[in-house]
Amino acid sequence: MKTILVTGSKGQLGNELQLIAKGHPDQFIFVDVDELDITDSTSVNSYFLENEIDFCINCAAYTAVDKAESEQETAFKINADGVKNLASASKITGAVFIHISTDFVFSGDQNKPYKEEDKINPLSIYGESKKAGEENALNFNAKSIVIRTSWLYSSFGNNFVKTMIRLGRERESLGVVMDQIGVPTYARDLAQAVISIIDKIETDGLREEEFGLYQYSNKGVASWYDFAKAVFDLTSIKINLRPIFTEEYPLPAKRPAYSVMNTRKIQEKFNLDIPYWRDSLNECINEFRY
């Protein structure tokens, strides 16, 4: 039986991992900032040694994309320095480090799905901090797996799906951006993929070349408008939904216009079957109580 540490346990992905862990044979330890401050390297090293960690799944992150523009130090402290501390501590105990990153590391200036080896060029402080986190994970522990994901949602926490449902009930009309293209990703699908990767490593081991950078999102492509339309269709909420351009809804942080990711590598390396985004959205919405 292995010991798996999950940081950021109160977030969307952390909560989904807690559900899966209930039926898993390994020992899971779930922590959030109250139990373990990942920005404190001394505390992190001690925690890893005391608990003999075999795997660390880092779901902890500063995710306030717009606030990061004015809170740069905090964003980098959590998304970059915290990752360095976890990667370094994982190396000390020989643990495999699995770190979750984002499509916001891309500039969005191409028109075909991004591959892992494509150039990254973040447009925001949040994206820059996550880019630094990727680099720290890979540089400070050779046994690191970095997984970029996109547009994460769940029945847990605050997210786009819940916001759309709330606004749909409050308003008669709503404008949603139609010129930003990506892929909605159900946090439960990502959680199951991460556990499948750990199971494979435990069963088959992992060659040196299999560590590194991967990408995971649900299948298909959507705009935020498409995503919102699907939410309203699946919840039978009646609202006048209007497609708008990004320039009509200015925000402090710039978003990539196109951030669809190629997921072939993670599918083939770990034999994963990735669901279509709308099917997963339907599954998630069926868990909500109205």
Image (spheres, rainbow, N blue to C red):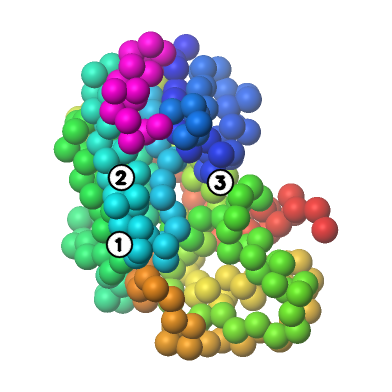
Please tell me in which quadrant of the rendered image residue 203 appears: top left
* 259 versus 247 height, above or below: above
- Horizontal side of 90 relative to 178 (left or right) equals left
Query: For the point 56% across and 46% down, which residue is it?
Result: 12
Query: For the point 34% across and 23% down, which residue is it?
Result: 43
Residue 220: x, y in percent? Answer: 49, 65
Q: How many marks?
A: 3
Q: Quadrant of the image for the C terminus? A: bottom right
* 227 versus 274 height, above or below: below
Residue that badge 1 annotates: 125
Residue 206: x, y in percent? Answer: 28, 27
* 49 versus 265 height, above or below: above
Residue that badge 3 annotates: 12
Residue that badge 2 annotates: 77
**Magenta segment, which residues?**
37-54
Residue 107: x, y in percent? Answer: 27, 70
Give the foreground label among 3 and 1: 1
**Is 232 in front, or is 61?**
61
Other residues around mark 2 within 10 Å, as few (<14) / some (14–19) / many (≥20): some
**Is 42 in front, or is 6?**
42
- Residue type, label 1: Ile
- Residue type, label 3: Gln
Query: For the point 39% across and 73% down, which residue is it?
Result: 252
Q: Looking at the image, tell me whether mark 2 or mark 1 is earlier in sequence order.
A: 2
Callout 3: helix, strand or loop? helix
